[in-house]
């Protein structure tokens, strides 16, 4: 599930990834589900991507989905410091209240705009600048994200990596849960056999 403030590029990332190109014509709704087939290490995987609007009025829809999510792709725009601040103040509390265990891939989107003169001038007038990789990596560590990736839906720079990391994080989580379950089952069986004698 892609989560983050409105206008950070979540929908554009999905469209560019699934359809292998940037589409400025797509009109987002409050809640969109995209499915696709990808290959990970030669194994076909059906991927379901849930895209929710970042605006407050859709918070209830998002929170209904959170408990059932395998992995969160938590997005902020590298050229929108407010969206970065909201990762800690808004999104992590919402996610972890509803789902304490699913992994998070932190994504700095719109990397193609980090060197756009118009954007840089606008940010300078606001006495700010693009979010640095160093700052984003520190946040990723603090929120215990599986990984941090900067990407651009427009140029597709690192775009595939975002979704690859999400798939790997989900598989690692499921594998870890199944190993724990197997260990608990074996331990229970062992204790039953001892107690039964």
Image (cartoon, grey):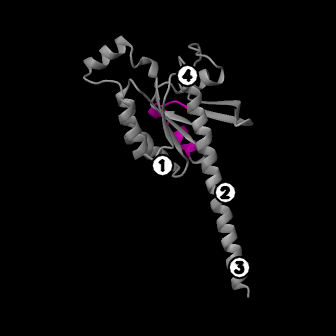
Q: Which residue is mark 4?
A: 12
Which badge, 1 or 2, comes first in the chain's sequence? 1
Can the viewer see residue 51?
A: no
Marks 4 and 1: CB-CB under 8 Å?
A: no
> Badge 4 local density, few (<14 within 10 Å), some, or many (20+)?
many
Separation of residues labelled 4 and 3 (CA atoms): 54 Å
- Judged from this view, the residue extending furthest toward the bottom is 197
Q: Which residue is mark 3?
A: 192
Q: Quadrant of residue 21?
A: top right
Instruction: Please state the horizontal and vertical placement of residue 173, each as a whole percent of the image.
Output: 60, 50
Can the viewer see residue 165?
A: yes
Q: Quadrant of residue 11?
A: top right
Q: Which residue is mark 2?
A: 178
| Left or right side of 20 for 59 | left
Residue drawn 61% across and 24% down?
17
Separation of residues labelled 4 and 2 (CA atoms): 34 Å
């Amino acid at each position: 599930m892609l989560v983050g403030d409105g206008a950070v590029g979540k929908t554009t990332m999905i469209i560019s990834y699934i359809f292998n190109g940037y589409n400025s014509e797509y009109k987002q709704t409050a809640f969109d589900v995209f499915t696709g087939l990808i290959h990970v290490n030669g194994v076909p995987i059906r991927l379901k991507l849930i895209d929710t609007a970042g605006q407050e009025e859709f918070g209830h829809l998002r929170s209904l989905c959170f408990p059932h999510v395998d992995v969160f792709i938590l997005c902020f725009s590298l050229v929108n410091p407010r969206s970065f601040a909201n990762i800690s103040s808004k999104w992590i509390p919402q996610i972890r209240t509803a789902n304490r265990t699913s992994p998070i891939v932190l994504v700095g989107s719109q990397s193609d705009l980090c060197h756009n003169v118009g954007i840089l001038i606008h940010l300078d007038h606001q006495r700010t600048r693009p979010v640095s990789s160093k700052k984003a990596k520190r946040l990723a560590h603090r929120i215990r994200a599986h990984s941090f990736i900067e990407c651009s839906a427009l140029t597709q720079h690192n775009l595939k990596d975002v979704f690859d990391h999400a798939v790997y994080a989900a598989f690692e989580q499921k594998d870890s849960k199944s190993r724990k379950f197997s260990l608990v089952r074996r331990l229970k069986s062992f204790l039953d056999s001892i107690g039964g004698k």
